[in-house]
Image: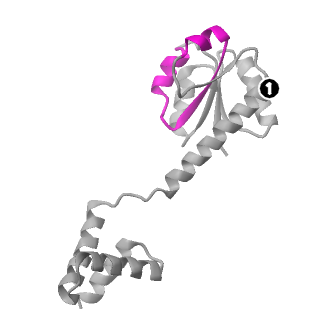
Amino acid sequence: MTNIIVLFPKAEDAGNVRSLLVRHGFLVSAVCTTGAQALAHANSLGDGILVCGCKYPDMIYSELRSVLPSHFQMLLVASQRVLSECSDPDLMCIAMPLKVRDLLNTLDLMAEQTARRKKRLRQKPKARSEEEKKIVLEAKSLLMERNHMSEEEAHRYIQKCSMDSGTNLVETAQMVLSLMNF
């Protein structure tokens, strides 16, 4: 479930938006009345959506947008005049007067985008550290030296052993090193 922060300068407006979102199944992690509060909550959460107006006691939406963590999306709720001046292509906007259906549909869309981005990041292979690269390289060198394999053959051998045993490439390389160094 996507974290949502609600930010409006009037506590009553922020509370009303929070109640509306909670009634429709959204997880509202924080309700704020200043940009600094919203920024502090955004920095403490993994990712999410900030639903906000355009002016707060301590800043305006564009200033907040420039310091908002990259893993947070912003949904600006403002007048048509303010939205016409907005030039940020990554900023989602809804015009006032607010229509509940528009707000809910937009948040659903943004939550799906967040979920897809998280899934892509989980599936992306993690970069190996220098130490891990060194272990794999040592195992390949040992296989090349003792078994007269090319580098590609040694790599494929470690890769296949890794898949067969259900361990990652570095663990398999460590096993090769420990078995062949006896």
Residue lying furthest bottom in this view?
A: 182
Q: Amino acid at mark 1?
A: Val
Residues 46 and 73: in front is: 73
Q: Indicate left or right for 121 with 182 as reference.
A: right
Q: Is residue 180 left or right of residue 95?
A: left
> Residue, x 55% and y 40% (percent of image)?
45
Q: Is residue 172 above or below residue 88?
A: below
- Is residue 82 shown in magenta? yes
Residue at the far top: name it: 81
Image location (x, y in percent) of residue 120? 53, 52
Image quadrant of residue 93? Answer: top right
User: Horizontal placement of 57 versus 166: left or right?
Assistant: right
Q: How is the image coloured?
A: one colour
Disc 1, SS: helix
Q: Position of residue 147 (x, y in %)?
A: 22, 89
Could you classify mark 1 by the number of other residues whose Cα lies within 10 Å: few (under 14), some (14-19), or many (20 or more)? few
Picture mark count: 1
Please, is residue 39 above or below residue 85 in the view?
A: below
Task: State the residue at coordinates (67%, 46%).
Answer: 1
Range of residues picked out in magenta? 59-86
Q: Residue furthest right?
A: 23
Name the residue rendered at 31%, 60% in the picture. Answer: 129
Quarter of the image for residue 108 reads top right
The quarter of the image holding the C terminus is: bottom left
Q: Residue at x 70, y 31 (%)?
A: 106
User: Which residue occupies the foreground of this view, 109 or 63?
Assistant: 109
Q: Which residue is mark 1?
A: 100
Residue 52: x and y, percent? 63, 22
Does residue 44 belong to the magenta stretch?
no
Q: Please state the horizontal and vertical placement of residue 38, each as a whole percent of the image.
A: 57, 27
In the image, residue 95 sits, relative to residue 48, either above or below, namely above
